[in-house]
Amino acid sequence: MRIALIVYGSIDTLSGGYLYDRMLVEYMKSRGDQVAIISIPWRDYARNLLDNFSISLYKKLVDLPVDLVLQDELNHPSLFILNKAISRKRDFKIISIVHHLRSSEANPKLVNYFYRWVEKQYLQHVDGFVFNSISTQDSVEKLTKKNRPSVMAYPAGNRLHPEISHSQVAARSKLGGPLQIIFLGNVTPRKGLHVLLEALREIPPEYWRLTVVGSLGMDPRYAEEIRRSVHRSGIEKLVSFTGPLDERDLRSRLYRSQLMAVPSFHEGFGIAYLEGMGFGLPAIASSDGGAGEFVTHGVDGYLVPPGNPSLLYEYILRLSSDRVLLSRMSLAALNRYRNHSTWEESNSRIRYFLEKMSH
């Protein structure tokens, strides 16, 4: 197959959505498919709306010599009019990879109304979908009121190739000292780091340590406010910021951690939770979105409603104080990971769907 994939910026951007796209591209190339990446500059939402009136982008898209065009749904502001404009002239189908809808995030009511309208226009002018979770699929179908050809393929967690035994997980869980918590995600408001810190400030310092792994450059103003908050609270010695880590260093950090906590306001899926489970880390995850499709509350993690520091406080204190419970949940997390599909299995499902759509 000849495929074009449209993304904002670089496909090597560090986020779960870009990882999903990148793993699919690598798989398809390994099967002999030709995949061209078309990058649209990533600006603010309003300026990306103007891409719909770009003659050069229109000509580039309408003349693509491909069987299919994949579009990361994140690009919807740049394409919601363009897709309609080229619909009568293109010889290929457009498939949207939907990680989560922007209108599913926590936004002011009027702003979200506008996002929903733009996304609805975009979604109605594609030919099919790749969904990362049932939750994401449901949100799209509720918005569009239509069923189009689609495939649901869960992300996987085996990118980091964890090698850890049940006995190692159990022994680590029962180590004395502060509970070693890892937050894995770019430091943006949606990921809820400020909510996690609000909860941790109420827990005695001898009970916890937090490592924040992720870019501080995605939302510099928010990241700076986080650093100031840590300083004002006097917990600088309890919180460390590593920035992004390569796979080797991330593996090392996950081996040494005991709990994954990312209390997002919304997650289409939440690859970080699953990757943590591969190292035997229970996940404190968002109840809003797709995490509940693989995190079982009270068994291998906890599902927390968005913006709820009191529950975070309760669950973290419980796991820090009861290492037998931590051990039981850690082993359950490892088992859950091992029963989950691999990237190859998920990407094989997607490729089979794309082959059918290309004919």
Image: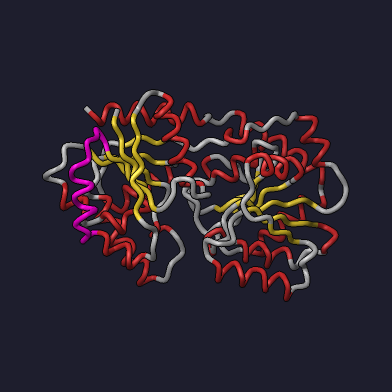
Q: Residue 47 versus residue 352: which sits nearer the camera?
A: 47
Image side of residue 146 versus residue 85, left or right: right
The part of the image, by quadrant, that contains residue 67 is top left
Residue 8 screen position, x and y as percent = 39, 53
Residue 61 lies in the magenta-colored region: yes
Residue 3 screen position, x and y as percent = 30, 35
Q: Is 235 situated above or below 357?
A: below
Q: Residue 112 versus residue 188: which sits nearer the camera?
A: 188
Tell me which residue sits at (68%, 67%) in the image: 198
- Residue at the top extreme, as displayed: 31
Which image quarter is the C terminus in? top left
- Residue at the left extreme, as displayed: 88
Residue 62 lies in the magenta-colored region: yes
Tell me which residue sits at (71%, 61%) in the image: 313
- The magenta segment: 52-68
Tell me which residue sits at (11%, 45%) in the image: 88
Tell me which residue sits at (42%, 71%) in the image: 108
Residue 329 visible at all: no
